[in-house]
Amino acid sequence: MCAAEAALATPMKKIAMLGGTFDPVHHGHLRSAVELREMLALDQVHMIPAQLPPHRDAPGVAALDRLEMLEAGIGDTQGLNADDRELRRSGPSYSVDTLASLRAEFGEQARLVMALGVDAFLKLTEWHEPKRLFELAHLVVIARPGHTATPSPALQALTKGREVGDITSLFATPAGRLLHLRLPSRMDISATELRRRLQAGLSVRYLLPNAVETYIQSRSLYR
Ligand code: ATP
């Protein structure tokens, strides 16, 4: 079978990556991942905890605890998975490397999406090789309460000519386009606020899955 025939025989996968520190994972992340999958008709959303996030201070909780909380939070949710590929690499967690590894796994024709909240998107020009991100994937920017999208001139230059207005246009190519998305349930939940509440001995009930709260209590995390 030649390459073109093989491509026709293999159904084109639609895959998203949602990276983060997940320190800890909360319903803002999880509900966004579920709704993203439904809206884009994705096969899988890979939720990928970062080992050493290059853009921020190191998390106070060990990578393996963050991964276990993510696994507990996802539970049996269809189409989401806790992907530990960044934890298996040494050194900083660059998203371009993660996307390159997803691209190698799913092939040239797969529709690959890097999903991120608007707060993260606004800092995109500070990332490692930001131009290359678009060679590897589409970017889907998720609206988040309390964050308005006012891109800097540098970010405007980086994304110039890439923005599309609908999902069909996004998936016309395997990578390279930008879509802003308002998911149905926008949740004003942040890990920073959860850590503050846990530190202060306040309730985090219903902001994150019970299984994650149980894990946090059993390991005395964020005290
Ligand atoms: P922190 O408050 O520690 O910065 P966070 O809650 O923003 O954490 P991260 O792990 O940094 O969580 O986020 C991973 C990704 O999920 C980022 O792209 C972020 O923008 C997005 N995200 C986080 N919280 C939400 C939310 N409530 N709604 C939509 N996207 C979110």
Image (cartoon, rainbow, N blue to C red):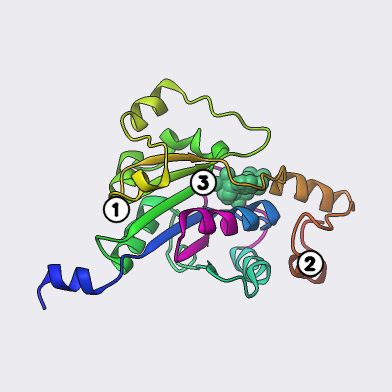
Q: Nearer the viewer, residue 71 or 57?
A: 71
Is 119 placed left or right of 24 in the picture?
left
The quadrant where residue 212 appears: bottom right
Disc 2 target residue: 210
Bin the neighbour count of mark 3 within 10 Å (Cα to Cα): few under 14, some 14-19, many 20 and up: many
**Residues in magenta, as a range:** 33-62
For label 3, the residue is 116
- Does the CB distance between marks 1 and 2 fall below 8 Å? no
State the CA–CA distance, disc 2 to disc 3. 24 Å
Residue 92 in the image, given as x and y percentages of width and height: 45, 53
Tell whether 8 sits left or right of 214. left
The image shows residue 109 at horizontal and vertical percentages of 26, 60
- Going by the numbered disc 3, the residue's amino acid type is Leu
Q: Earlier in the sequence, mark 1 or mark 3?
A: 3
The response on whether ligand 1 sits within 8 Å of label 3 is: yes
Whether residue 51 is visible to the viewer of this picture, yes or no, is no
Tell me which label, 1 or 2, sits earlier in the chain: 1
Labels 1 & 3 near each other (Cβ < 8 A): no
User: Which quadrant of the figure contains the C terminus?
Assistant: bottom right
Which label lies toward us, 1 or 3?
Answer: 1
> Mark 1 or mark 2: which is in front?
1
- Amino acid type at image mark 2: Asn
Question: Label 2 neighbourhood size at 10 Å, few (<14), some (14-19), many (20+)?
Answer: some
